[in-house]
Each structure stands twice: as structure tokens, then as C-alpha cells.
Amino acid sequence: MANRIFEYFVVCGIGPEIRTLDGERGYQGNGIMYLPSLLDQYPPSDHTLYPPPPPQLPTCVLPAGVEFHASGFDSKDPSTFPRSYPIVLTEGDGSKIYVSCIAFRDPVCEDIVEAYNIPANSFADKCICLVSRSPSFRILRDALEEIFMLCFSSSGSSKPLWDLIAYLVSNVPLPTPGKDRVLFAIDNSLLAVEVPPKHGLPHADISFQPLVQCLDVDNFIKLFTAVLLERRILLRSDKYSLLTLVSEAICHLIYPFRWQHVYIPLLFFSGVDYIDAPTPYMMGLHSGVDTFGLTMDGVVVVDLERNCITTSEDIPPIPEPEYSSLRGEIIKLLHPNVVGIDQMKATMSNFREEFLRDRCKQWGDDHDLQLRIIFLKFFASILGGYRNFIENTSTHVFNTQAFLKKRSRSTNQPPDPMISQFLDSQGFLDYLERGLGSDESNNNLLDKLQDAIGRGQNPLSILLSVFEEPEIVTISDPYAGTSGLDAKCYDRFPSNVRNVEQEEKRKQILAAASGALEYSGRHTPGSPSVFAGQDKAESLSPRERAAERERMVLDIKVKLQGLWLRLLKLGATDDPLSSFEYGTILALIESDAEGIGGSGFVECIREHIHSGWTCQLTEEQFIAVKELLKTAITRATSRNDMATTRDALEVSAEMYKKDVNNVSDYVQRHLRSLPVWDDLRFWEGYFDYLLDRFSSKSANYATLVTTQLIVMATHMAGLGLADTDAWLLIETIAGKNNIGYKHMIKLRGFLAHIRQICIGYWGIYSSKSQAVPLYGLPSPRPQDAATEAQQPAEASVVGRSWVQSMFSRDATSRANSFSRVRKWTSDGGDLAASENGKPELSATGQKKIQTSIRTLRGHTGAVTALHCVTRREVWDLIGDREDAGFFISGSTDCTIKIWDPSLRGSELRATLKGHTRTIRAISSDRGKVVSGSDDQTVLVWDKQTTQLLEELKGHDAQVSYVRMLSGERVLTAAHDGTVKMWDVRTDTCVATVGRCSSAVLCVEYDDSTGILAAGSRDGVANIWDIRAGRQMHKLLGHTSWIRSIRMVGDAVITGSDDWTARMWSVSRGTCDAVLACHGGPILCVEYSVSDKGIITGSTDGLLRFWENDEGGIKCIKNITLHASSILSINAGEHWLGVGAADNSMSLFHRPQERIGGFSSTGAKIAGWQLYRTPQKTAAMVRCVSSDLERKRICSGGRNGLLRLWDATINI
């Protein structure tokens, strides 16, 4: 595979399983975007010699998704034209895959149209791709365009298109760099490909012209600097090709350095949340994608269409004299007429003549080469003499400080921040490591260029080599040149031949989508779905049968609509039960084996209600409608048609009559007489229905079964089943699903309280209506409750949600409707009760049930800092203060808010204003709140009066850490690399207790010993003894940012972006262990004091538990509960709180009785057990804080909302 230039030919588009980007199955109409699928490929998927294409390929080549269209290509409509663009994919090992794509509109396959009832003659987006490991963009595009034109040309191709593709992919080799030129033909078109020698600049088969055309020189250099300093880069354009070409061009211009971080030149639209990733990246995003609501904090946004660069963080400029030299060289290349405008028109110099001749020369390969040499010369200048400072030792690769001092002496300027940051970058470190002890150092063009400049030679001399005419390698095609002889012509891009297994799988998917594996076999002679005769039905094609059935369904619905309206218009003397309308509707419902009559009847009632009908029936109409609905429900349940049953219950809860006392009696109440509610088979079918549609993958099976059985029990109560009958049905189903006795006890306890829940759902009738029992079902319509004093208003609204959710296909609406019974699915199982132990009821009889999740609103920007006021912070001689358990949040809206969780509905206690930029850090003590911000200030507030007390200024960059200490002291750290101690009483900086060589990201301080540990952006952890005023150790080992740090006793644990955590000894300054099992940066570390174990959380979503094992540290437990980055871990003696970036939270518990039961060799830390986790809501979280004493976890999202979970409320 490595010796072929074309690795794969792939076709992507709409497959047999249609699903929208939001996850909805089936065809939802035009204007909706659908998930693309891999349709065809060569080599085929069953080829054992080649691995499959990347699984993300369909999503990446069609980044917007797939859309259906009413028409195909139109020469007068540019929006229908095919589009050709390249993309680049990056695999896990850093290797790149280059793809050339052509997207176009192609007719939808007939079997898909038939299965999903898609309008005939529809078109959908399709994309054909050539995939390669070689960055040969031009030949990939040329070859793909030839295939595309050959497919749709009027003359056709000389042989089947897929045979031509197979020959192309299998036989065209990758040329030997600098030696071969491969010639091959696609039908009658001759193409050539060659690769430059390896000893020159890396192969860049792109033009750099789009980059210099989109950005002016200053913005061009600004983008180059941001990439060099490894910022988060987001390119925006409405052209796919531009995003990829600019990304590739800027990566080539930083040669000999490499981009070491996330690289997605063309981001698929649904992945827009990736922009909030905390690590460096370079991404390209279409201008049409809305980024509203994203924080974009620190992201360098480059608008290629408007020549505009915006960012919230300053990009340090390139120092002089390199900046002026670089800018002048670029302008000279781009605008030679302007640069040479003062030159004489005539001169004796040959160079002058050559200059005048080339001034108006169009951009070409020589311009690309000159531009790359300009930037290579820039690196040669700014890194002059760098080789003298390379130190191949165990702790250092490069002596940065000595190099900066040498440069300062030579330029008579202080060390420049841009160069300092660049020398700390991953790209520079990778460059040094690649050069040490490898052959690459012998071919290093940067070193050669520095030497050539030092000798006064032409910089281009480093690229000169003995010219060798490449050897021609011709790939002959025996079928070339025979076009027109039995030519193959196509009206669409053809499908590749499928094997038997693939064809059978496709048929099964389409059959399941259409709802009938064998449609014709389901017809019965008595059914209205039988057409003119059996012979006629068998003679119809599948498409004709589908069209005929569609016409028949429409005809039945139209007839039912007319019959229903005439039924309602019968006079007072007419008997509806003996009317023609009633008899015809009943016949259509009873005789239809496919349920079209019953579902159509229910649908026409629902449409009538939505049109504004008051739903009031006469006594006679009431009886007729009641009997028709009973029949419809009976027939639907016999077919296991849960959707029709659900719809029938909904409309029955709307229609009513009034008795002599003006009390409403609803149709739904009379449905309780149906025998189906006592049928075990129905409830078993309904139970399976619930499991199929509402199953939660994160719950274990026993909990899932219990949840659905509780939902069933609630329905049984609403329909008036006796307690003993309901329990018999539930017990039987529970026994068949083998749930444990604990869950059975929980179910029985729920049924014991079912009376109160039923009252809460439906309310209690007035005593005037003696015929209505306790479990009567009043209307769920709010307007009825408003006009009838006998009807509880609160119960009416809840009743409607219950009816809608009973057979709802929407898991979200069901979850909202049944929030009352979720608490029975967790381990507690007790009803929320008042202080006297009885359930609290409102005046209307509605039970008040608290929810465990609260949304706290107040911030108008993303929440960037969150602090929980612990008991330890506010404890004094009197005892706990009232503010223990408060949460304090900071945001990009520059405000700080104090929240009191004990005040439900009024949690916001105070808002503190004073900062001018984003809040990054918060701390507090008994009387004060301290905060640090991007405005480089630290503010101290009075917690009670919310008055601003002090403004501490002294940091030169954003403040990343603050902590209130005893004795009116404040400890702060910032991105300027300093750690400072302040005296609040005098508003002064007492001392700069520590200095790091780069930004400080995390700090730990033990006030009892005076030991301070700080992790920084350069991957170094520093330890100081503040009381002795000295630095104890400089801990070296991490190769990337240190995100988190934890210090307990003599142990320090650090977590880094290099995917490892390390355990260090404070006294010895040595690394005792490296914890390296995560698949991403480690964002948080925690130390469990009680069992002396370590817990780590990473961007891979894993929670790992580590413990000492025979002299080493071993991972003994993994938790995969969360699907996104772990942001916070907080461990107490018996409780462990975890929060993740996808707004999921979890609380772990270790039973007290087990703590002493572990043996000395057992895995103590494995005793943590998942106690509870709330239902997750869609949000992107920036920070999480835990209050383990009160079992609360709070998260702050980029949308400005705080989500407070109280795990003690057992919902």
C-alpha cells in the first residue's frame, strides 16, 4: 500500500440508513442536513491486505452533511455546480492523509426513494474522493476530475468506470523522489506525477498564492507568529479549498518546525464545539457556521474573506530587526513594481534587465520557492548561533536563558517575549529532539543556510544539486484509446458491485425502514388495502405498489374526515349509534388489518381539535365517540400499535360532555373499561416498547428495568387498575427480567404511595359528581380547569403531560413528564417527605416534589471560575458560619456572583462588580472574597456588604490563581511567571515568593509548612520554601503544560498535557512514579488521603484510580462514565465528586464499614462505588466545583448558566 500513490477511491453520500445530523431516523424533508455514509470504495472493504479508510472520512469530505434537492445540475444556477476541494486528515500517530474531493448532486437510488417515501426524481449530495498518503494535491485533483468528466461525458468510457478506477488505484506507483516521473492514462487523458528529492524543502504540491492574496502583509505575519507560538487558530472562509490550502501553506512556512497539535483544516459543521478545546489547535471552519454562544476566549480568528484577524489575547510581535527585514522581503516578492519604482528604466546591469523582465510575471512555482526561502532566512536570523546552546543532557536539550542573554547583548535589547515563547514551544523542542543523534541533522537546511550566509554565499545555493533527468515510468492501460467502441455512458455515478452479504444487509435495512419485510404477504382478502384483485397486485412493481398504497391511505383519511364532520352535525333527534356515519367509521376501523382506519380516525379528531374545535360533545355524540375510540384502541393494541394507542388517549383526554351540574365528564375516563388494561400481553409489549425507545446506555440493566416498570405502574394508576392487579402484572414482568429483591422492594414501595401520585396527576372531583370514583380522569386542558371550580388547576396541566408521555417517542418529553418517579430508580427509593415524615401536598392536592437539578441564571457570559466555600475556610470558634456551602462564580461578563443553594428559587445572594476583563480565579475566607482576572488585578471584597476593599496591582499578565490565607494575606500567581504574597491590610505586595520561566497555571500551598508548589506552561514544577525564602527544587520531566497539581505531605502529583501524571517527593525533589495510561492531556489530579491513592481525569473522559503496588504505582480501576474531558475531581473521606466538560457529573461513595476491612495488599482505592449521577443536559462546561459535605456539585457553562446538582434529593 505504501508504494501506491492512490490508496483508496471512495464514494460518500446517502446510504440505506438515513439519519439527520440531530439523530432523527428517516427522511425528514428537503432543507434538512443528513449524516453522510460510505457508499462504495476500492479496494473493497472485504480486501484483507488493506486496512479500511478512516471512519471519519464521510463526515469530513461532506462537512455540512447531505441535503436532498428537487433538481440536479443546472447550468444557470451556480449553487448546483460540482465543487472540487482538498482536505487533510490527521491520524492518531500524527501521520497525514490527503484527500481530493468532488461534491455534486446525484439522483437518489430508487430503492431508497421507495423505502423512505422520498419524492420521485430527487437528488442528494454525493462526494467522490481519491485518498493518498502522498501530499500530491495536483495529481489527486487532476485524476479525480478526469474520472468525474469521464463518467458524465457524452462519449462515455472505454470500459466500466469501476474497472477503470480499480486499474488506476492498483497500478499507479508512487514515484521515487527525485528520480522517477510516472506517466499513466485515464482513458484518453495522459497524466504525469513526480516527487522532488528528499534533500530539499519538503514536498509542497500547493500554491502559496491564496495565502498572500487573502491577507495583507501585516496580517500574514501576525498569523505566522500565532502559529509559531502555538496559539489556538481558527480560519474562516466560505470556500473549502481555501481553508485547506491556507492551512497547508502556513504549515510549510514554519519549516523546519512542525505543527505539533490538533490539525483540522476543514472542520465538519457539527463539530463546532471543538473550538472551545483548551489545547492549541489549527482548524478551518466554513463562514456559514454560527459560532454564537461559543466562548472563543483566546482563539485567534482569521477571516480570510475580509482580511481580518481578531483575538482576545495579545500576540507578541516579531522583534526588530527581523520584523522589518521579513516584511520588506515579502513586499518585494509580492509588489516588485512598488519596490522598484525608483529604479532607472535603463541600466547596464544584466540583473536590472532581468528584474524589469520579471516584474509582471504571474505567480508560479518560483514565487512559492522564494517565499519559503524568505521565511527560512528569517529563522536563520532569529536563531543565529542556536547550535552553540544545545545541551544533550538528562534535564536540558537547549539552554534558553543563555541564548536569550546572548541575543540581548548582540541587539542591545531586553529578552523578547515572542522569542521566549517560541523557544518554549513544542515545535522547537520537537525540532531539537529530531536533530539529536539522527540523520536529519545532516540534511538540515536551516543549519546549511546559516553556514551559507556566514560564508557570504547565495541562500539559494543550499538547494542547488546536480540536475538529473528523471527516468520515465509508463503505466500502460490496455483499454486506453478505445473509447466509442461499446462505450459505457452513465446518467449518475454508478455503484460498485456488491457481494451477496452487502446486498442482503442493504435490503434488510431498507425493509426495516419501509416497515414491511414482505409487503405483499401481509394483505388479506378482507382488508381495504387489497386492490382490484390479487392478479393486479402481483403485476405491480414495488414502486407502483407503494404509490397505490399511498393513494389508498389518502383516500381513507379523506373519507374519515368527511364522516367525522357529518357525525358531529347530526341533529338532536338523530341516534349517532344507528347512523350511516358511525357504521362506516366502525367498519373502516374493524376491517383494516394494517391500522389505517383506526389511526386515520384518531388523526382526523386531532386535526379537528388543533383547528380550534371546543371538544364539547352532546350526550349522544359522547357515547358514539367513546365506542369508536374503544374499538380503535382495541384494534391498535392487538397489532401492538403503540403510537395509535397513545394518540387515542391524547384526544380522549380532550373531548368531554357536561352533566346537569355543569361538571365535565371526559371520554378518557370511560376507556378504563377496556379489557386490554388487564391483559399481561399488552403490558409486556408496552414494556418492550419502553425499553426500545427510552433505554439509557449509562444505566445498568436492573435499574433500567425498574425505571420502566415504575412508569408502567404510574400508567396503571391513571387508568384505575386496582392495586393488587397492578402489582400482579408488574411482579410477573419483573420476574421475567430477573431483577433483584432490592428493586422489587422499591417497586412495592412505589405502589404503596400510588394513590397520592394518582391524585397528583389527575386531581379529585367534586362530591357533586357521585359517579366518578377517586381515580377519575378529568381533562388535562387548562381552560376547563379555569372555568370549573371543581377541577384542580394544577392537576390539569400535569395530566396532559402524562397522557402525551405515556406512549411518546420523544425521550426528552417523557423524562420531563416523569421527573416525579425518577427518584425511585436510584438507590434510595424514599419519597420526598416533609419534616413530619408525610408527603407535602399543596392546597389543590398536588404533591410538591423537588428536583435534584437546578439551573442558576445570572451571568451573561461564559462561566470561567467557580469556587465552593468550604467549612474549613469559614470555621471559627463559634462554629460553622452560614455561608459554608455557598458557591461563588466568575464569568467573561466581568462579574462575580455569590449563590446560596439553601434558598431554592432565590439562590443569588450578591453580585460583585469591579473587574474589567474575564474572571479566572476565586477564593474566600470568613469575611472576604478575593478574585483574579485577565485585567492583571486582584480584587478583595467584603463578603457581607459586597463592598470592594482593596485592589492589588503588581502582576504583568492575567492572574491564574488566588487564595485567601490566615492573617489577612493573599497568595496569587499569574501568567507573568510570578507568585506573590500580599498583605490586605496595607494593600502591598509583601514578597514575590517564586518566579517561573513561563506562565503559572496551577498552584498548591501548605500554610502549615510554608511549602509552595507551582506548575507552569513550560512543563516545569517548582517547589519553594516560603518561610526560608528559597527554592527547594525544580522538577523536570513533563514535556508540555502542567494543568493540575496536588500536594499532600511529602508527595506532589502533577498532571500534564503530555498525557502523563507524575508523583514527586517534596523532600528529595525526585520523580517517584510516572502515571501514563491516559489517551489525552490530564486536566485534574486528586489524592485520596484515607486510602493513599491517586485519581486522575483526562480529556479522554476516563477516570483512573491508582494505588501503590509492590513498590510501584498501578492503575487498578477505570471509570468510563463520562464521555468528555474530566474537569474536576474532589475527594473527601467518604465521598468523591467528579465533573466533566459535557455537563455530566457523578458522585462516588465508599461505605464507612468497608474502610477498615481492606487488607494491606488489597486495592483500597477500588472501594469507591458510584453513588449517583444526574441526568445529563446538553451544554459545554468550563469549570466544576464540589461541596462533598452537602453532596452538591455545581458546573458553569459557556452559556452563562450554572447547573447545581443536589444528590441528597433522590429523584
Image (cartoon, helix red, strand yellow):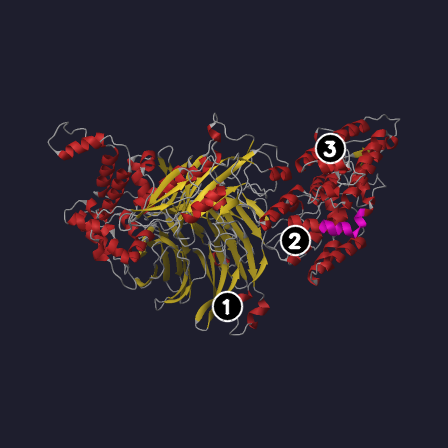
Front-lying residue, 652 or 1173: 652
Numbered circle sitting on residue 823: 2
Left or right: where does residue 987 sit relative to residue 685? Answer: left
In the image, residue 926 above or below residue 628: below
How far, Cα to Cα, is label 1 from label 2?
A: 31 Å
Q: Position of residue 1179 (x, y in %)?
A: 52, 45
Left or right: where does residue 511 sit relative to residue 1133? Answer: right
Left or right: where does residue 829 sit relative to residue 1107? Answer: right
Residue 881 visible from this viewpoint: no
* Residue type beneath disc 3: Met
In the image, residue 77 above or below residue 1146: above
| Label 3 crowd bin: few (<14), some (14–19), many (20+), radius 10 Å | some
Magenta part of the chain? 676-687
| Label 1 crowd bin: few (<14), some (14–19), many (20+), radius 10 Å | some
- Identify the residue under disc 1: 1091
- Identify the residue under disc 3: 552
Q: Position of residue 811 (x, y in %)?
A: 64, 45
